[in-house]
Image: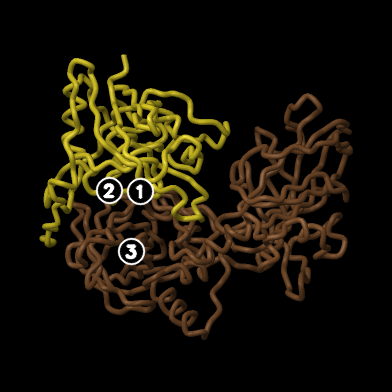
Chain colours: A yellow, B brown
């Protein structure tokens, strides 16, 4: 059956290529701090740490107009290997482990923090513990914007997730939680909405 | 000065957003009235096409019921949905099957298709003829909001919006939807025997009695069974939790010993006590804004426990009474989590029956509460039983 495939393809300006530093073994891309508490009913709950524009911005810490396919390629260039998204609670996500940090300018001061610090764990009432994220790779399927099969991160637009139940993210949290309301944005650390930051990813050694 | 609770409730009232959490399931009891109030557009249509290989479908919009639907066709991609959900929905995208869509200005949406809701999100900036809506998941708990045929919901929605009908309250008794239920649900066009539908799709009989007997606390010590009364509308009073808690809403409320389906009049309106079971550690009390719920649990201990403490959590403010004495009061807005508060003075749990009563105020969003007892060393009391009726 032929459904009219969308011809709506984001312009080149909307998606940026990540920067690869092969010597340092890092991949980085620009992002902005997301708006928090857009919907009071969510009571600050988030499900992602990084999304693309038009992804779940109101449930994320950062929004990054990065090309997810180029990011996927770049991660492999620094030696990380994508695994598979979780199938269910008994089959969690697999893939190379990554460390992710955020760099930004806070007044005159250059700052960098592990991305986990921007997430509050409601169970411990503290910022999330440092982890090594899983490069699960997004599951594939028909992507209307392409009119063809591709990585579903292109249609769902959520890049780095906190719950493995969403198998369309490129990277996911290792805790193996499938869904929930355990995490909130750490507003004490998160820069104000719209602040430019740099997300830096490296393969965990 | 407005309290945090009132600011929370005012923002919730003004927000045009659906209370649905895109990606997170709608967990709270979600009244249909709230769905209608928070929808910018409600439209009905029929499934026009379906490609199970590409996991895409389209619904041709026939008419707007609320607002103006600017989409002639709602084009859906469901391959990115969570877990088993993309495999479960295809057989229900039957050509000609009716569907209702509820969406807000941000294009967060719920579509009702053959007795269950699916969560969608669209791109508000895309031209309607090019827009795609991505399914995140089946709303496994919104069958508590409504679970009849689409035509029945459409008819009900139109009557409610025109003032000719009162929307039903959500039914907490209906179990969540799981994969086998969706698989066993007859698709549009197939014969339906209402009595043989999977439980999550069967209408709940409000006069049937729920299991009320004492049950053990969970492995962490959290009370699992309550009697619940509410939600009692508070209006502006919700902003002054202290004043609300200082008022006697039900005669003898500190020492209540209600029964299932027992009636109570609160602020001139009639209510009924219903059994409410906890899900994991907390009891879900719905999401009626600016309201209050009462909770009672018959807690039975097999021994005297001097020096105990009560650890509680609530969304939002709450006051707790144990055996007729106030033991805890929290006055702010927050989400519910384990062990948010601990009673300051040692408590004496009696061997035998102890009555635990609570009043919880909700500003906006979901509301709920949790409680467990610990001994003087902080160890959860795991031998307690608690229920919605006294021990036999």
Do labels 3 and 2 touch, CB within 8 Å?
no
Q: Residue at x 37, y 38 (%)?
A: A49
Front residue of this view, candidates A64 and A180: A64
Q: Residue at x 50, y 43 (%)?
A: A181
Which quadrant of the rendered structure holds the N terminus of chain B? bottom right
For residue B149, side relative to residue B325 (left or right): left
Disc on res. A57: 1
Could you confirm whether marks 3 and 2 are on the same chain? no
Do labels 1 and 2 touch, CB within 8 Å?
yes
Q: Badge 3 sits on which subunit?
A: B
Q: Secondary structure at mark 2?
A: loop
Quarter occupied by residue B83: top left
Q: Residue at x 48, y 45 (%)?
A: A45
For the residues marked 3 and 1, what is the alpha-carbon distance in whole angstroms? 35 Å
Residue B243 percent coordinates (x, y): 78, 60
Name above or below for residue A8 compared with residue B44. Answer: above
Disc on res. B187: 3
Asked whether residue A91 appears in the rendered view, the answer is no
Residue A160 percent coordinates (x, y): 33, 36
Disc on res. A53: 2
Disc on res. B269: none
For the residues marked 3 and 2, what is the alpha-carbon distance in whole angstroms? 36 Å
Front residue of this view, candidates B204 and A104: A104
């Amino acid at each position: 059956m032929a459904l009219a495939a969308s011809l709506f393809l984001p312009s080149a300006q909307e998606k940026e290529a990540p920067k690869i530093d092969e010597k340092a073994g890092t991949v980085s891309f620009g992002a902005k701090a997301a708006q928090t508490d857009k919907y009071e009913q969510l009571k600050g709950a988030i499900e992602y740490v990084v999304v693309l524009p038009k992804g779940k911005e109101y449930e994320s810490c950062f929004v990054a107009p990065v090309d997810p396919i180029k990011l996927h390629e770049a991660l492999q260039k620094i030696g990380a290997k994508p695994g598979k998204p979780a199938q269910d609670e008994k089959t969690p996500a697999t893939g190379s482990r990554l460390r992710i940090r955020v760099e930004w300018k806070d007044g005159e001061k250059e700052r960098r923090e592990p991305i986990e610090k921007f997430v509050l764990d409601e169970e411990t009432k503290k910022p999330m513990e440092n982890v090594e994220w899983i490069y699960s790779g997004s599951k594939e399927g028909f992507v209307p914007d392409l009119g063809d099969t591709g990585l579903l991160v292109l249609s769902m637009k959520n890049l780095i997730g906190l719950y493995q139940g969403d198998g369309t993210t490129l990277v996911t949290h290792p805790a193996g939680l499938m869904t929930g309301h355990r995490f909130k944005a750490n507003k004490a650390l998160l820069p104000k909405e719209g602040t430019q930051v740099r997300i830096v990813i490296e393969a965990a050694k | 000065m407005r309290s945090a609770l009132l600011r929370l409730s005012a923002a919730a009232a003004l927000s045009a957003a659906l209370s649905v959490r895109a990606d997170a399931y709608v967990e709270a009891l979600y009244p249909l009235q709230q769905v209608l109030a928070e929808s910018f557009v409600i439209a009905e249509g029929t499934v026009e096409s379906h490609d199970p290989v590409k996991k895409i479908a389209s619904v041709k919009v026939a008419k707007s019921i609320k607002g103006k639907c600017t989409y002639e066709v709602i084009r859906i991609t469901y391959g990115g949905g969570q877990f088993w959900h993309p495999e479960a929905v295809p057989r229900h995208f039957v050509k000609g099957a009716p569907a209702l869509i509820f969406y807000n200005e941000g294009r967060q949406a719920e579509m009702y298709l053959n007795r269950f809701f699916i969560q969608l999100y669209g791109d508000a900036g895309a031209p309607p003829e090019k827009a795609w809506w991505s399914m995140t998941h089946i709303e496994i708990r919104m069958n508590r909001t409504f679970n009849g045929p689409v035509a029945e919901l459409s008819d009900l929605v139109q009557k409610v919006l025109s003032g000719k009908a009162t929307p039903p309250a959500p039914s907490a008794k209906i179990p969540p939807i799981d994969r086998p239920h969706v698989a066993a649900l007859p698709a549009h066009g197939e014969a339906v025997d209402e009595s043989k539908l999977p439980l999550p799709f069967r209408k709940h009989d409000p006069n049937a009695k729920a299991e009320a007997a004492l049950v053990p606390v969970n492995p962490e010590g959290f009370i699992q069974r309550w009697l619940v009364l509410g939600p009692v509308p508070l209006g502006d009073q919700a902003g002054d939790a202290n004043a609300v808690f200082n008022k006697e809403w039900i005669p003898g409320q500190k020492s209540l010993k209600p029964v299932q389906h027992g009636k109570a009049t609160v602020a001139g309106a009639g209510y009924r006590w219903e059994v409410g079971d906890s899900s994991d550690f907390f009891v879900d009390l719905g999401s009626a804004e600016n309201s209050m719920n009462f909770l009672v649990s018959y807690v039975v201990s097999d021994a005297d426990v001097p020096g105990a403490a009560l650890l509680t959590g609530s969304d939002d403010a709450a006051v707790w009474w144990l055996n007729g004495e106030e033991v805890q009061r929290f006055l702010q807005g927050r989400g519910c989590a384990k062990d948010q508060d601990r009673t300051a003075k040692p408590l004496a749990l009696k061997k035998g029956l102890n009555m635990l009563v609570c009043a919880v105020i909700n500003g906006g969003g979901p509301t709920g509460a949790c409680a467990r007892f610990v001994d003087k060393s902080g160890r959860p009391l795991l031998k307690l039983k608690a229920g919605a009726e006294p021990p036999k």
